Amino acid sequence: MDLNLEAAFDEPVDLSHQFDFPAGSLARPELVSLSSVSFSGRLERHETGFVLNGRVAFDGVTACARCLAPVAFRRASETSWVFAPAHEKPREDKSAVKTDKGDPDDGLELNPEDLDVLYYNDLVVSFDPLVEEQVQLELPLKALCREDCRGLCPMCGADRNLAPCACKPPSDERWKSLRTLLDPGN
Ligand SMILES: [Zn+2]
Ligand SMILES: [Zn+2]
């Protein structure tokens, strides 16, 4: 989906769209499946550019970080993108970049200095990469099927939630010899 910033030049524009990102395209091997990503929001003028405020929502299934069992998740987040014309992009010269005080006449709560500003040359902006970035931020990082998941045995691969296996972690032996060294009388 392309954002036509110019459409909001005279008055705010309400937008909604469903995005489909194939789970395999997100470079997240633990992700099993992902629903369509729904976006709804409002594009309006902001200072010399535009701001898009909206809500990104999706759900999906990911793999438990310990035992690989499927874990369902659901996400919804409010987000904002600020667009400013490219000619306003601050130069590398740092002294010119920041001022501590926002514009006191700015009626919006949004302070663009707190956000990443997207500088445009063209009033038509590709929106998909921006939504995909938001999805990446919201995807669960280390989902667990349950807090006390025992995970898979690193030795034999058995699911230790189902039954304990007979393997002994190799570190046990090392600790034993260390204990003998520290306390020879034992
Ligand atoms: Zn698990
Ligand atoms: Zn085992």
Image: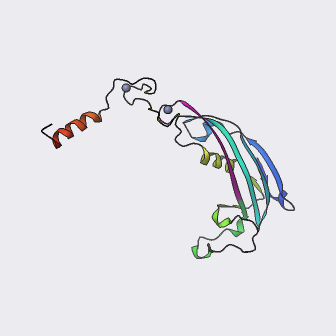
Is 3 colored magenta in this rendering? no
Residue at 71 percent of width and 60 percent of height: 82
The chosen color scheme is rainbow
Residue at the left extreme of this rendering: 185
Q: Is residue 20 left or right of residue 68?
A: right
Q: Is residue 184 above or below residue 119?
A: above
Whether residue 83 is visible to the viewer of this picture, yes or no, is: yes
The dominant secondary structure in magenta is strand
Residue 130: % across, % down: 68, 51
Q: In which quarter of the view is residue 95 placed?
A: bottom right
Q: Position of residue 176 (x, y in %)?
A: 22, 36
Tell me if 13 is positioned left or right of 159 in this view.
Answer: right
Pick out the residue farthest to the bottom: 95
Magenta stretch bounds: 61-81
In the image: residue 77, left or right of residue 32: right
Quarter holding residue 28: top right
Front residue of 163/117: it is: 163
Residue under the image location 77 percent in, 51 percent down:
41
Q: Is residue 127 visible?
A: no
In the image, farthest residue toward the right: 10
Height in image: 87 above or below 166? Answer: below
